[in-house]
Image (cartoon, rainbow, N blue to C red):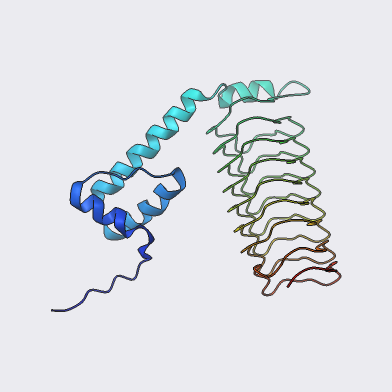
Amino acid sequence: MGYVFLDRDGKHFRHILNWLRDGVVPTLKDSKYTEVLREAEYYQLLGLIDGIHAILNKKKEDEELDTELTRTDIIKCIQSDRVRFRGVNLSGLDLSKLDLSFVDFSYACLRNVFFSRANLHCAKFKDVDAEGANFHNATLRECEFTGANLRGALLAGANLQSANLQDACLINSSFCQADLRSAHLQNADLTNANLEGAILEGANLKGAKLSNTNLKDANLQRAYLRQVNLRDTHLEGAKLDGANLLGAMR
């Protein structure tokens, strides 16, 4: 009897087997559905693929029903001065490519909001819940993210020069190629975050958590890293010229 070699990560294989046994789509967190969907596509399990898409579409519809404003409402509002959406539920909205500079989103629910290529210069995101939000290639210069939850957010290619992310939760977020020059990241939790190729020149990372953080090829020149634990941080190819590493654990 021969063997069949499956060149796949076994992490989600039990969900594949269970679906083949009983045809029931597993109950998972939103982020896990995408991973299982990738496996289903590999094995060409059309029924499981359709089932996952149906669940994700239903969740998106539910989020839109809970959202207090629509994209059209936002466009009308930003035409006036001093726009504030403090504490408003905007989860799941598509706000891509809009000029949202100086808008105050403090304390708002921004889960899974699509901010791709939006101009958010000087916008305020204090204590927002922006888990899973997409800021790909957005302009975030001088934004305030103090105490924000950005777990799993996508910030690849974003311009975050001089942004304030102090005490922010950035677990599993992606900052690939992001511009974080002079950003304030004191006490930010960057556990498992991906900052490969990011520009962190002059950034303040005092007290930041960098466990399993990917900083490969990142520019950390003149960054403040005093007493930061870098033992589990991936720093291959990173530029550390002039960085303050006094007391840092490596």
Q: On the picture, is 108 further left or further right than 42? A: right
- Residue 94 lies left or right of residue 149; in this view the side is left
Quarter of the picture holding the N terminus: bottom left
The quarter in which the C terminus is drawn is bottom right
Residue 249 image offset from top left, x and y in percent? 75, 70
Residue 168 visible at all: yes
Residue at the far bottom: name it.
Answer: 1
Vertical side of 49 occupied by 84: above or below: above
Front residue of 33/154: it is 33
Does 214 appear above or below 237? above
Q: Nearer the viewer, residue 136 or 236?
A: 236
Whole-percent x, y for residue 123 in the image: 75, 36
The correct choice, above or below, for 19 with respect to 43 in the image is above
Residue in the picture at 70% in, 35% down: 127
Tally of numbered tags: 0
Residue at image point 73% right, 30% down: 103
Please state if 120 lies on the left or on the right of 172 as rendered.
right
Outermost residue, left direction? 1
What residue sits 36% from the left and 53% below the top? 36
Q: Nearer the viewer, residue 18 or 83?
A: 18
Query: Vertically, is 250 above or below 90?
Result: below
Q: Nearer the viewer, residue 29 or 101?
A: 29
**Residue 45 in view in this figure:** no
Give residue 179's position: percent from left, percent from top. 73, 55
Quarter assignment of residue 30: top left
